[in-house]
Image (cartoon, helix red, strand yellow):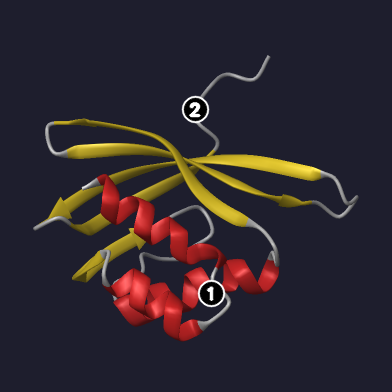
Amino acid sequence: MTDAIDTFFGAWQLESREERVDKITGAVAPGVVYVDPRTPEPITSVSALCDYVGMFSANAPGWSARVVSTSTIAGMTRATVAFSGKGADGKEQTQLGQYFVETEGGLISRMVGFVGIGAPEC
C-alpha cells in the first residue's frame, strides 16, 4: 500500500502531464477523494487530481515531493511527505506535510493532507 503513496507523490514533480496521469492513475482508485488545506473543496476525480498535482510542478519548478515515513494501523496510513527545492533566496528548503490515507485494492481511495506534522512550535 505504501507503494501507491510513493507512486502518487513521485508524480508531483513530473512536468509531463502524460507521465503524471500515468503515475497517478496507477496509484489511485477511480472514485478517489483528495483534500488538503489548498483545495477549496474535496477533489473527486482522477482527472481533477492530476490537474491539481500539476499545479505543484508548474508553481514550484525543480521541487520534489518524497514520502519520508509511513505508519499504518486499522487500515489507515499516515504518511509524512517532504516537499523540497530552492526557495526564492536560492537556498534549499524543505516543508513537511502529513497525509492520512485509506485504500481499496491497494489503490488510494481517500487522502486527507495537513501542512506540517502536528508538532508544537517552540
Q: Position of residue 118 (x, y in %)?
A: 49, 27
Q: Residue at x 57, y 19 (%)?
A: 120
Distance, label 2 to label 1, CA atoms, is 26 Å
The answer to which of marks 2 and 1 sits earlier in the sequence is 1
Q: Is residue 94 left or right of residue 31?
A: right
Q: Position of residue 101 (x, y in %)?
A: 27, 47
Q: Position of residue 13 (x, y in %)?
A: 56, 65
Q: Is residue 88 above or below residue 54?
A: above
Where the C terminus falls, by quadrant?
Answer: top right
Q: Mark 1: give few (<14), some (14-19) or many (20+) Cα within 10 Å.
A: many
Residue lying at the far left in this picture: please name it.
105
Q: Amino acid at mark 1?
A: Gly
Q: Say which of 81 and 114 sits in front.
A: 81
Q: Residue at x 74, y 42 (%)?
A: 93
Residue that badge 2 annotates: 118
Q: Mark 2: give few (<14), some (14-19) or many (20+) Cα within 10 Å.
A: few
Q: Is residue 66 above or below residue 63?
A: above
Residue that badge 1 annotates: 54
Do we see residue 111 in this rendering?
Answer: no
